[in-house]
Amino acid sequence: MRSLKFIALCAALASLAAGGAKAATLDDVKAKGHLQCGINTGLPGFAFTDNRGNWQGFDVAYCEALAAAIFGKARGNVKYTNLTGKTRFPALASGEVDVLSRNTTWTYSRDTDLKQTFVGVNYYDGQGFIVPKSLGVGSALELNGASVCIQTGTTTELNLAGYFRDNNMDYEPVPIETNAEAIKLYQAGRCDAYTTDASGLAATKAAFDSPGDHVVLPEIISKEPLGPLVRHGDDEWADIARWVLNALIIAEEKGITRRNVKRMARRSGDDAEANRMFGNEGSFHEMLRLPKTWARDAIAENGNYGEIFEKYIGRNTDLGLERGVNALWTQGGILYAPPFR
Amino acid sequence: MKTVQQQYEVGRHPDLPPPLVERGVVKWVRDNFFSDATSIVLTAVALYFLYKVVPPFVEWAFVDAVWNADHRNECRARGEGACWAVLRARIAQFTYGYYPAHLYWRVNTAFVLLFVALAPLLFEHVPGRRYLLWFSLAYPVLAFFLLWGGLGLEPVESAKFGGFLLTIVIGVTGIVGSLPLGILLALGRRSRLLIVHTISMVFIEFVRGVPLITLLFIASTLLNYFLPPGTYFDLLLRVLIMVTLFASAYLAEVIRGGLAGIPKGQFEAADSLGLGYWKSMRLIILPQALHISIPNIVNTFISLYKDTTLVVIVGLADPLGISRATLADSKWQGLSTEIYIAIAVFFFVSCFAMSRYSLYLEKKLHTGH
């Protein structure tokens, strides 16, 4: 093991001497042969392992789509780095990961001060509260003096403080690190209420032995637009990340699914936008320096946005989330991708 | 007693066995549990406590437990007991992390060989000890190639390491690496050479003054800022280095304590034999100093071994990291009790073995001054 250290030290020193001229992220990714994607250490529906040890989930599916857009398929071309709430931004800024897809809220200071580029929103979330029915509380405004379990290093922590201050209420924070830990503490009665994003609350409630004994309070106290992000300084890479996400949303709009994407991509029908996206008209893929089939491959990986949603967090999963505001703009939601032209 | 017929000559009566209440189990129980009012009360309280805790636990963990299920709900449907099925489904991940399944044999081989390499170091009476010691020396290199690949073996990147494999890799590397480093630092701190002394002291004081978590954060985040962009410096490697340095600083102080316990006469005796510094240390001083320090050294090792769980904070997939990923799977969500009990058992067994070995070593080396 010490020889390992020695080798790596030499390698590090050698590259120090060589001096790293910063290449474009896309070229880096192609050169190393895989996309390094930063994901959660474990969040129901969004990032988890199956029994065989493969990472899956709503956030992971985006990584796979991005890898497929670059390499043709995700299998073998995407690697994951598990990041906690505290390590995610340094890991992205230092280049340890190429893209961060880890239920991260798009905020002003993260965009500007932390020098990151959010490429879009893949889930509009909002912070809520869950309480035991026995507490007899029907509204978040009745939580004065309650102890609240709260995940550290997140925007939810700040929202909570702000909400209670604005409403002249006191609370006792019980800081915890992960969702699993929060479930235990909350079930043990260590805190009166647990607050996190509404999607997390749904997951939490689903895990309880008797979900009926708990209520999610009606108040949503914050806007939590979650989305993938890349670091400042490589706009071309940000464009790729952004348009892979947009392609998934556009695909849902047009009814292009995992099943029919191959056929849809081949057939040059009347839909000019789809033709542009699939490279049947013009050479739009060259603007991103991606292969002609990038959009087809990205959609073929896990399907369009709606399919990914239903597969991992939708009504038929244990989370059972409704589309709500995350429905397409044509279906009463606010999901809206810019036109592909 | 008075009715017993005197059948013996005076002074020839054989010893009678002690009365029933003064021997065997009865006496032991009386002496230990019911010797006076306080102990009677304490015993009663303890018995009541055990009665309240043990049967429900046994019922939960064994009687009502479910071993075969594909989903948490299946467990719940079948009973209120522990859902050990989660461990059954994930045992490979908890053992090997994300290590490729067809290469498990390499991990297993390395694990078995670890004991072959340790045996001659830990026990004196091992057949062929002299040859085995060479094997022990070569083991780190061998284990490295077995685990990480190379030399014709399929390479496996450290991101795939996880579970108890990761715990053992970090623990063993830390223990093996920190002992020599700790000895050198302890000697350095007692050295009269100004530079050596200062460097050792500054290093020890710095590392001891900083929590391990901070060092791990430095390893996982800050180091990358100093290195040129695009340099990939393996996270596990960074963590291994930090853990080793951290443990070596503590060990240095433990061993320094041992060195301080050696009477001055021993140093002078070594000098008067005409031994140089290294020889006198190796032959006279260190063997005695290390003897004195054994309990503390093992103590440091045990705490280092348990500290390996902190790596979960920098996102490595140690057993706790695996448990996070497992608990996020909606199939197994909420089964943290079962998983944490299993991890606790693993750590208890390893640490208990270490502490037993240290007792054995102390007894063996006890020369009864």
Image (tube, grey):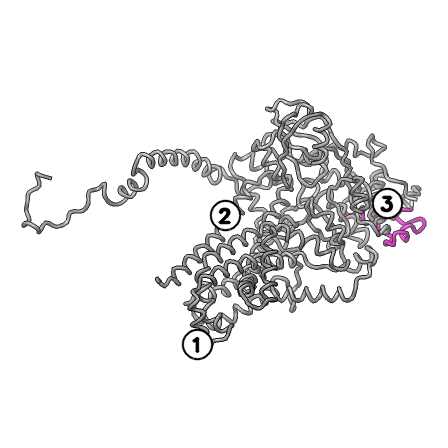
Q: In front: A96, or A311?
A: A96
Q: In front: B364, or A305?
A: B364
**Residue for badge 3:** A264
Q: Secondary structure at mark 3?
A: helix
Q: Residue at x 60, y 38 (%)?
A: B334
Q: In front: A183, or A59?
A: A183
Query: Quadrant of the rendered structure where residue B244 is?
Result: bottom right
Which chain is mark 3 on? A
Measured in 3D between alpha carbons, the distance from the residue under mark 2 to the one under mark 3, in whole angstroms, is 55 Å
Q: Is residue A300 above or below residue A150?
A: below
**Residue for badge 2:** B345
Circle nearer the N terminus (1, 2): 1
Camera sees residue B176: no
Instruction: Give a yes or no on whether discs 2 and 3 share a subunit.
Output: no
Query: Quadrant of the rendered structure where residue A242 is?
Result: top right
Q: How many marks?
A: 3
Q: Is residue A173 above or below residue B278?
A: above
* Dots 2, 3 in contact, CB < 8 A: no
Measured in 3D between alpha carbons, the distance from the residue under mark 1 to the one under mark 3, in whole angstroms, is 91 Å
Which span of residues is magenta-colored? A276-301
Q: Horizontal and vertical percent for residue B294?
A: 46, 59
Q: Which mark is residue B273?
A: 1
**Looking at numbered disc 2 in the image, what kind of residue is underneath it?**
Val
- Tell me: A41 left or right of B112: right
Q: Secondary structure at mark 2?
A: helix
**Looking at numbered disc 3 in the image, what kind of residue is underneath it?**
Met
Q: Horizontal and vertical percent for residue B263?
A: 42, 65
Camera sees residue B338: yes
Q: In front: A117, or A36?
A: A117
